Amino acid sequence: MDFTLSEEQLMIKQAAKDFAQSELLPGVIERDETQTFPNELVQKMGQLGFLGMMVNEKYGGSGLDTLSYVLAMEELSKVDASASVMVSVNNSLVCWGLETYGTEAQKEKYLTRLASGEIIGAFCLSEPEAGSDATSQKTTAIDKGDHYILNGTKNWITNGKRAEVYLVIAQTHVEKGHHGINALIVEKGMEGFEIGPKENKLGIRGSDTHSLLFNDVKVPKENRIGEDGFGFKFAMKTLAGGRIGIAAQALGIAAGAYELALQYSKQRKAFGTEISNHQAIAFKLADMHTKIQAARYLVYQAACDKDAKKDYTLSGAMAKLYASEVAMETAIEAVQVHGGNGYVKDYHVERLMRDAKITQIYEGTSEIQKIVISRSILKD
Ligand code: CAA
């Protein structure tokens, strides 16, 4: 497979890198500490087209391919994974889901505003008792003719408070199991919809994560995505692509940690020389570099599969599994290379280490990726 990047792809990568250095890097430590992320920064990401990268231009997007998207995700994630998770959820889960399965009316009403970054969306599948076991939805959407009545709780929702539009997965026909699940578009401000307290997280602390409470929320039927009962398939198909975005995020965290470790090791002296001259450090750098490149190829492969309209469930799961392991391992090693300095906030690597952990958990844990991968390779 030839992964030579086109001029346009290189430009997008550079634009994301420039934005990350000039706009995300200043204040990233403070945002992590205060668990905040200013709206102006989100707006800037929207203006630069990062929030609707793969959406057709007629719906306000940038009309780019998935490879361009993962290139941008890698660069943003090197510096601020809280910013890149917003980008990933809005692009892969919300915009892609709406563009692929939404009605024309839904696209006009919601997608154009989401893709341009005027508003942000959230994807609401997880529940207190349905994280990995996503078929066990307890949130109900009872069919009342021209509308649904939505009741239940969603947990760990990225963009939980900032979002204006929520794609909510809920059970309509309990007797049909996962074939009775629907995906509904819920708007902030609908009566009975409440946003729970913010989670105090280990990492990606700039991104707002909340539980959501639905108490007899009336959702018009025209807000259902796809046919009656399509909700679980919708969630699975959407997540299959989402995993490519998170794989790219993990790759970026790994690459960011590696670049900091490399730079530091060439400056820091111990035992009379730069620490990069000690094999103990040089071998760590060699391992990091090799594994990051392997992860990058897996991420690019998954993105290219999606662009080529091939099945990307397997390649996306492999990319996410491996890139997230490399992110965790590399970030831990980058802290080690920094020694005592790695343990304090100013050097960034401790944040990257905390941020890396979530990539092994959200959009399916590593164990879930192994289920997806093993089922795929065993089915033939
Ligand atoms: N594409 C299309 N359909 C799919 C699919 C895919 N990739 N994966 C599964 N399905 C379909 C199956 O074909 C099956 O349909 P039929 O019954 O009609 O044949 C149906 O979905 C159920 O599939 P399974 O029998 O395989 O279901 P399961 O319960 O055994 O397990 C699972 C499926 C893969 C473990 C799934 O539950 C899963 O992915 N769990 C993890 C959920 C997850 O990723 N949550 C993340 C929350 S979102 C998030 O984190 C966002 C964020 O904030 C950043």
Image: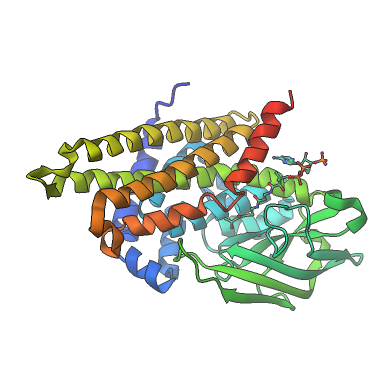
Across and down, in percent, residue 200 comes to: 50, 71
Question: Hey, which residue is sitting farthest left in the picture?
Answer: 272
Viewer-nearest residue: 61 or 27: 27
Number of labels in the image equals 0
Across and down, in percent, residue 8 comes to: 40, 35
Across and down, in percent, residue 160 comes to: 59, 67
Q: Give the residue displayed 54% in from the left and 71% down from the top.
A: 199
Residue 247 in sight here? yes
Left or right, 22 with respect to 110, comes to: left
Left or right, 315 with respect to 13, comes to: right
Q: Quadrant of residue 283?
A: top left
Across and down, in percent, residue 121 comes to: 60, 61
Viewer-nearest residue: 187 or 2: 2
Q: Give the residue displayed 38% in from the left and 55% down from the top.
A: 352
Residue 74 in sight here? no
Q: Give the residue displayed 36% in from the left and 36% down from the top.
A: 10
Quadrant of ligand 1 in image? top right
Quadrant location of the C terminus?
Answer: top right
Viewer-nearest residue: 283 or 201: 283
Q: Quadrant of residue 354?
A: bottom left
